[in-house]
Amino acid sequence: MTFDKDKFLEFCNRISKNTLMQTLNIEYVDAGPDFLTATMPVNPTVHQPMGLLHGGASVALAESVGSAASFLYINPEVSEMRGIEISANHVKAKRSGIVTATSRIIHKGRSIHLWEIRITDENDTLISVCKLTNMILPTKKGIQ
C-alpha cells in the first residue's frame, strides 16, 4: 500500500473543521509515512498576557499534530485514538509569525503510540519539544 500524502493531508484538514484546530488556525501542511507537520499562526489570539505564545496553545498544537499522526498507523473505521499523556518543554519565546510542529513516531505498538513533536519557528529555531502518548482503541463509530 502506497502513502498518498495529498489524500492524508486533506483528511487531516477536513476532520479539523469546527474543532479547536480550526479555532487556532492549525493547518496540516506536510506528511510522510512516519511524520506529520502542521502550522499555527502566532498572534494575539494565541498569546498569554505578556504578549508571548501561550504554552497551552503550543501544547494544543502538539497534541493536535501528534494525535492526527496516529492516523498514519490505524484504520479510522475500526480504531480511534485518545491522547493520554503529554509533556512539553518550552525553550524559546515567540511573539509573532508562524510556528511549525512536526510529529515523529518514537514507539508504535498495537495499543500505544509515542510521538515526539518539535515546534520550530520560521528560522528553524526550536520553540518547544513535546512528547505525546496516544492509546489506540477499537471503535464502532469511525470518523464521520
Image (cartoon, rainbow, N blue to C red):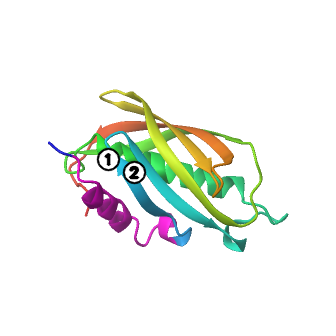
Residue interval drawn in magenta: 3-22
**Left or right of residue 41, residue 53 in this image:** right
Which of the image's four quarters has the N terminus? top left
Using the rendered image of the protein, determine whether residue 84 is visible from the camera's viewpoint: yes
Residue shown at the point (39%, 36%) measured from the top left: 135
- Residue 70, percent across and down? 36, 43
**Viewed as shown, does residue 52 lie left or right of 74?**
right
Determine the residue located farthest toward the front in the rendered image.
123
Mark 2 and mark 1 residues within 8 Å of each other at the beta carbon? yes
**Residue type at numbered disc 1:** Phe
Place of residue 105 in the rendered image (x, y in percent of width and height, measured from the top left): 42, 34
The amino acid at mark 2 is Ala
Can you tell which mark lies on residue 68?
2
Residue appearing at x 45%, y 38% in the figure:
104
Which residue was labeled with disc 1? 71
State the residue in front, 1 or 138: 1
Q: Is residue 27 above or below residue 75?
A: below
Q: Quadrant of residue 73?
A: top left
